[in-house]
């Protein structure tokens, strides 16, 4: 007897409490269910069920066996679904969110590429700098940057995110280059969405509150101000990479550069992730890694 034989029938009988109801659930005859249970008990050399004319109940051995059978069948079904989903076509509506600037520059163009490959898929994207609650809002996916705080969600790392403190040679010639974190107080700092900048000091992460005469909650706007020589900026690599290579910007205080964070794909915990979410996450991870902004090159050189 194959060791899988009889497990479905046994679980169905245990849950339905009757051979007839179990047979109807499985779409087979009552005699087939009875034969499979009898063969299972013979194979196990243990009685699993107490039988009466009206109802079936579990023996002590049956109660123990039932929980293990449920786990086995769940694992079997999940394995089948996992392999089937590899070739399943993404379809239906996928609802997702991302920050405005990063979404416009990177995520939305790649999602559009993905949709062109899968015409049965519909996408609704909320670009917002607010941190939306995926579970409350009914969202399938979120793309977030930096460090994660919501432990309820499942995270997949899509790309690195390295922060650089930098300024133009003209600004540094005029104001001098800071040699320590303490010297930042005498510099004009171009503030984006937060005036708390992250660094490392004595092997510990620390945050400093900076000051300046310019502020805008847009990374692109901060970059433009920095390139005009207005002051110091702290921006992710994908904003400043080409300017560091060309010499238009100079990397500063590299010994205090904060630990690398990341770009993350987050989704609610689901035992069987839908093909549309899983395949989009895989697509974003692959395509982001192919972009020039994410090539593994030391921008400080």
Image (cartoon, rainbow, N blue to C red):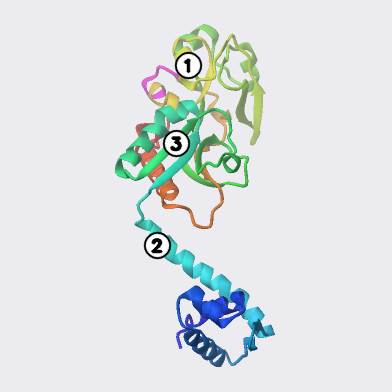
Report whether 70 appears left or right of 297: right
Q: Which residue is mark 2?
A: 83
Q: CA distance from mark 2 to mark 3?
A: 27 Å
Q: Secondary structure at mark 3?
A: strand
Q: Is residue 259 visible?
A: yes
Which residue: 31% across, 43% down?
A: 119
- Mark number displayed over residue 221: 1
The residue range painted magenta reads 244-249
Tag 1–tag 2 contact (CB < 8 Å): no
Answer few, some or many: residues within 10 Å of disc 2's Cα (few below 14, many 20 plus, some between 14 and 19): few
Vertical position of residue 26 compared to residue 278: above or below: below
Please report whichever mark, 2 or 3, sits nearer to the chain's N-terminal start. 2
Which residue: 63% across, 11% down?
A: 186
- Mark number displayed over residue 124: 3
Q: Position of residue 199 (x, y in %)?
A: 60, 29
As rendered, which of 15 and 64 lies closer to the eye?
Answer: 15
């Amino acid at each position: 007897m194959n060791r899988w034989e009889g497990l479905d029938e046994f679980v169905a009988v245990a849950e339905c409490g009757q051979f007839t109801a179990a047979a109807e659930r499985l779409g087979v005859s009552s005699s087939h269910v009875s034969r499979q249970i009898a063969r299972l008990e013979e194979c196990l050399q243990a009685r699993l069920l107490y039988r009466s004319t009206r109802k079936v109940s579990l023996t002590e051995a049956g109660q123990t066996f039932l929980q293990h059978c449920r786990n086995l069948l769940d694992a079997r079904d999940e394995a089948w679904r996992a392999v089937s989903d590899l070739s399943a076509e993404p379809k239906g509506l996928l609802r997702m969110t991302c920050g405005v600037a990063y979404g416009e520059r990177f995520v939305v163009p790649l999602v559009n590429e993905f949709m062109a490959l899968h015409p049965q898929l519909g996408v609704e994207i909320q670009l917002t700098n607010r941190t939306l609650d995926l579970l409350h809002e009914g969202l399938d996916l979120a793309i977030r940057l930096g460090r994660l705080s919501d432990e309820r969600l499942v995270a997949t790392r899509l790309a690195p995110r390295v922060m650089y403190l930098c300024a133009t040679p003209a600004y540094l010639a005029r104001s001098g280059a800071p040699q320590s974190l303490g010297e930042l107080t005498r510099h004009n700092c171009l503030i984006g969405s937060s005036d708390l900048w992250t660094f490392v000091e004595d092997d510990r992460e620390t945050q400093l509150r900076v000051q300046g005469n310019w502020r805008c909650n847009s990374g692109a706007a901060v970059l433009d101000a920095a390139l005009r020589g207005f002051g110091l900026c702290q921006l992710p690599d994908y904003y400043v990479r080409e300017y560091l290579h060309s010499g238009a910007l100079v990397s500063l205080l590299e010994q205090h550069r904060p630990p690398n964070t990341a770009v993350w794909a987050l989704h609610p915990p689901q035992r069987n992730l839908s093909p549309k979410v899983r395949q989009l996450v895989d697509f974003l991870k692959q395509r982001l890694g192919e972009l020039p902004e994410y090539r593994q090159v030391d921008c400080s050189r």
